[in-house]
Image (tube, rainbow, N blue to C red):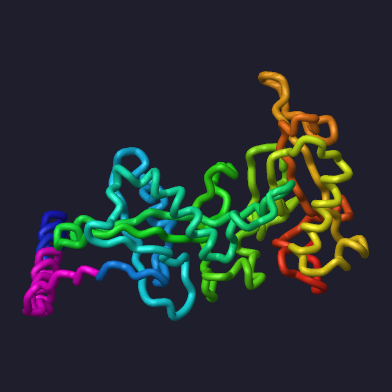
Amino acid sequence: MERRRLGAAALITALVVVFALGVLRSRVIEGEAVAVPIPPSPQAGDCVVQDPRQIAGQLHQWAWGGSYVSLRTAPCTGPRYGEVVEVRSGDDAVDVADASGWQEECRGQVYRLIGLDLRTEERAPFLPVVQVGLALTGPDPRAAAAGQRWSACVATLTRPASTGSTLGFAPASGTVDHPLAGAWSRGEQRPFAVCTDDPAGPDAVPCDQPHRFEMLGRGRGEPGATQASLERACADLAVRAVGAESPLRDGALISRALAVRPGPVGGPPVTGPAAISADGAFTAMCLVASADPTRQLVASIRGTGTGPVPLR
């Protein structure tokens, strides 16, 4: 009896498989395979429509002897992860071996794209602190095999990397629905803000998460600088960044100038007035924070004007 049941089960299984194969055969669609079209080379002003996080580990492989990678771009019609700043084609394309030199030129172009020209900014004692990414891209292997030869300088949105290092920002998770071109000079500066819990340390915090400080400016110390002169300059910068004096005057926010220089070998950095040296061998930072030490910022204060201060 047991053998009969096993045999019946095996027969039913075989019939199901045969039936399934018949169904699959009946659903075969005839036709010819068509290769995915190779996208055209990007144009200056195009939008990045591919999330750079998908290839974050490859974006800078050219710096270690690798090749360029390609980001999908399209004419700008809506939200974007970044924008194409410059494209060099044909004989003008930058060889990957020369990319390191081009990177600094691209960085200056990215700053100028958003409307921030460091060559014309007041250099004493603070330069604006800007969080904006750049990528050097080129044709993928299929496009290169088809004859495309180009290199592109691309501006991307960024946020602190998983390590929190301010020296290495990762691609941001979101998009903006307005052009990056001229955004800084138009007052749309919040996507480029830098926030931290420890300005003397290496870590940054995404500005849309609770944080103690927003860093507005940073620069080399100057001979003859005093804590008072740094505080005055920082207060002026804070008013310009907020777009109004009242949040600072009325006690919702405070500005703070912080001097930092290296401490003894293996020891913590020296901060505050003790870090200010007559030869200017220190770093000056301009910070803004909640005047109430029990509260934290939860967004950038740039451009908030007389509106609600982003505190919790």
Residue at far right of view = 250
Asked whether 33 falls inside the magenta stretch, the response is yes
Quarter of the figure with residue 299: bottom right
Residue 32: x and y, percent? 7, 75
* Residue at image coords 10%, 59%: 7
Q: Is residue 261 left or right of residue 55?
A: right
Q: In this view, does 117 lie to the left or right of 140?
A: right
Quarter of the figure with residue 228: top right
* Residue at image coords 39%, 63%: 86
Q: Is residue 224 left or right of residue 141?
A: right
Q: In this view, does 116 lie to the left or right of 267?
A: left
Q: Nearer the viewer, residue 64 or 280?
A: 280
User: The magenta stretch spans which residues?
Assistant: 12-39
Residue 14: x and y, percent? 10, 64
Number of numbered discs on residues: 0
181 lies above or below 71: below
Residue 199: x and y, percent? 72, 42
Residue at far top of view = 265
Q: Quadrant of the N terminus?
A: bottom left
Q: Which of 272 and 100 is in front in this view?
A: 100
Q: Is residue 143 visible?
A: yes
Asked whether 249 falls inside the magenta stretch, the response is no
* Residue at image coords 62%, 58%: 120
Residue 307: x and y, percent? 80, 74
Q: Nearer the viewer, residue 64 or 233?
A: 233
